[in-house]
Structure formats: structure tokens, C-alpha cells
Image: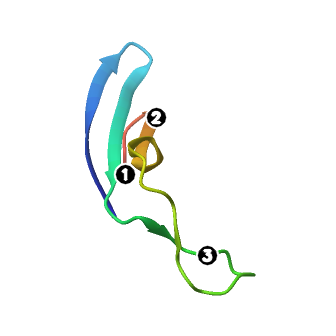
Amino acid sequence: WAVGGGLRIRTPVGPVRVDLGFRLNRFRAAPADEPQNPRPTGGDLADRLVFHLSLGEAF
């Protein structure tokens, strides 16, 4: 789960979307070949921020 905000810019080549999110939970799911115990991802702010850049409209 994450919360955040974004910016939408109309350009001549199409819309550009820039989003920044903050992960609320500090655990991530284990890969299929590992035990299903969640592992902490760390508490640093940089570890919990997520940046997303995309071109075009969202479905």
C-alpha cells in the first residue's frame, strides 16, 4: 500500500505522468521460492519512496 501524488503534463507528443508515492507498510512479500515470512524493507525514507514516470493515458 502507498499514498502519494502526481503531476500530469500535456505535451506535443502526448501526456506525461509523474508520480511520487510513499510506502505505508514496511514489509514486502517473499519470492515464491522462499518461506512466506514477510521481511522488513528498512525504515529509511529513501527506501519507502517510489517514483513513477510514464507517457500516455492510464486505462
Marks 2 and 3, how far apart in space?
27 Å
| Residue 25 percent location from the top left of the image | 36, 66
Q: Nearer the viewer, residue 13 or 47?
A: 47
Residue position for label 2:
54
Q: Nearer the viewer, mark 1 or mark 2?
A: 2
| Residue 39 located left or right of residue 13 | right
Discs 1, 2 touching: Cβ within 8 Å: no
Q: Nearer the viewer, mark 2 or mark 3?
A: 3
* N-terminal label among 2 and 3: 3
- Classify 10 Å Cα crowding around label 2: few (below 14), some (14-19), many (20 and above): few
Residue position for label 1:
59
Secondary structure at badge 3 equals loop
Q: Is residue 18 above or below residue 43?
A: above
Marks 1 and 3, how far apart in space?
29 Å
- Mark 1 residue type: Phe
Query: Residue at 46% of width from left, 69% of height from top?
Result: 27
Query: Residue at 26% of width from left, 46% of height from top?
Result: 4
Query: Residue at 36% of width from left, 26% of height from top?
Result: 15
| Residue 41 located left or right of residue 9 | right
